[in-house]
Amino acid sequence: MKNLLGFLFAFVLCYSSDAQTHKLAFNLVKGKDYLQTTSAVMSINQTVSGQAMNINMTVNGKVKYNVVSIENDVYNMDVSYTGLSMKMEMPGGGMSFDSEKKDTTDIMSTILSKMKNKPFQVKMTRTGKILEVKNVGTLFDNILNGFPNISQEQKEQIKSQINQSYGDKAFKGNMEMLSAIFPDKAVAKGETWNISTQLEAGMPFLVNSIYKLNDVTATQYVISGDAKMSSTAKDKEVIQNGFPMMMDMNGTYTSTINVDKATGWVASASFNQQIKGSAQVKKSEQLPDGLNIPMEIKSTTTITGN
């Protein structure tokens, strides 16, 4: 009888532990810096006029978030890049840019260097929703104005390319993929919740994610994500490499995220993305018949933070 009671007590204790709910949210401290290091490896496989044209890219970035103030559960932060690099391999050659490169003839590396330690502003809720990103465009304008030998047309083209990856909308969507992962209520281990995110980096996507609290350790929450991605502007033109085109892409996005229990900050994360579809280039003087480009994009991203 004593053994039976002991077993029942242990069972109830174990069940109660598993059923315990946890309020997942940011708990950042005013005046403190929070850091993120990101590395993304991407392959773009596409067919252009019957010819395979594959591109491999590696993008690395280091970002610092300083909590300036906290108002009504909204974090006002100064955000700045502390390091940026990009490497591309494609048919016929490759190129690389690095904010640490000391070569004034390398315009893109010089621009990345000038982007370092130039703060812009972000407002974020405790559940990670990004309410506002501002002054990224002003940052780019000030940087490009420091290149008097570049024509205005070239400046606009460079700004457009940078904005697609690092502009206000791009930063908002990319940050929310990592920050807006928390439910609006307390959840137990094994419980799931849904979150939708709009991405604007290059190709507009709607990302519908199902997150799950997989585990709770002494110091971390372990969260997994399974998402479906779909183009939101199939009939809207976007500019890619100077050509107006319409994108019809769909795919999947999986993630494993380890969150610090004390702060809510991401300690480490990994993401895998696979997208398939096509790009329809409009008719023009250069392409009188237009062009349909089937493509597949795969990427793996790892993130560490403290």
Image (cartoon, rainbow, N blue to C red):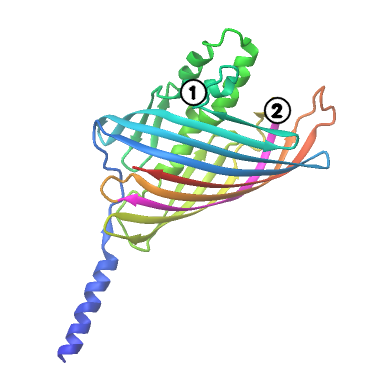
- The range drawn in magenta is 244-260
Q: Is residue 113 above or below residue 251?
A: above
In this rendered view, identify the residue nearer to me: 211 or 90.
90
The residue singled out by tag 2 in the image is: 244
- Residue 23 part of the magenta-drawn span: no
Q: Secondary structure at mark 1?
A: helix
Picture coordinates of residue 139, whole percent (x, y): 46, 19
Q: Residues within 10 Å of mark 2 (few under 14, many from 20)?
A: some
In this rendered view, identify the residue nearer to me: 4 or 184.
4
- Image quarter in which the N terminus is found: bottom left
Picture coordinates of residue 87, whole percent (x, y): 60, 35
Give the residue at the far top of this rendering: 148
Picture coordinates of residue 20, whole percent (x, y): 26, 63
Please tell me which of labels 2 and 1 falls first in the chain. 1
Question: Could you tell me the amino acid type at mark 2?
Answer: Pro
Q: Is residue 289 above or below residue 257?
A: above
Question: Could you tell me the amino acid type at mark 1?
Answer: Ser
Predominant secondary structure, magenta span: strand
- Residue 248 part of the magenta-drawn span: yes
Q: Is residue 292 left or right of residue 152?
A: right
The residue singled out by tag 1 in the image is: 113
Mark sitting on residue 128: none
Q: Secondary structure at mark 2?
A: strand
Q: Is residue 260 left or right of residue 98?
A: left
State the separation of the CA atoms marked 2 and 1: 29 Å
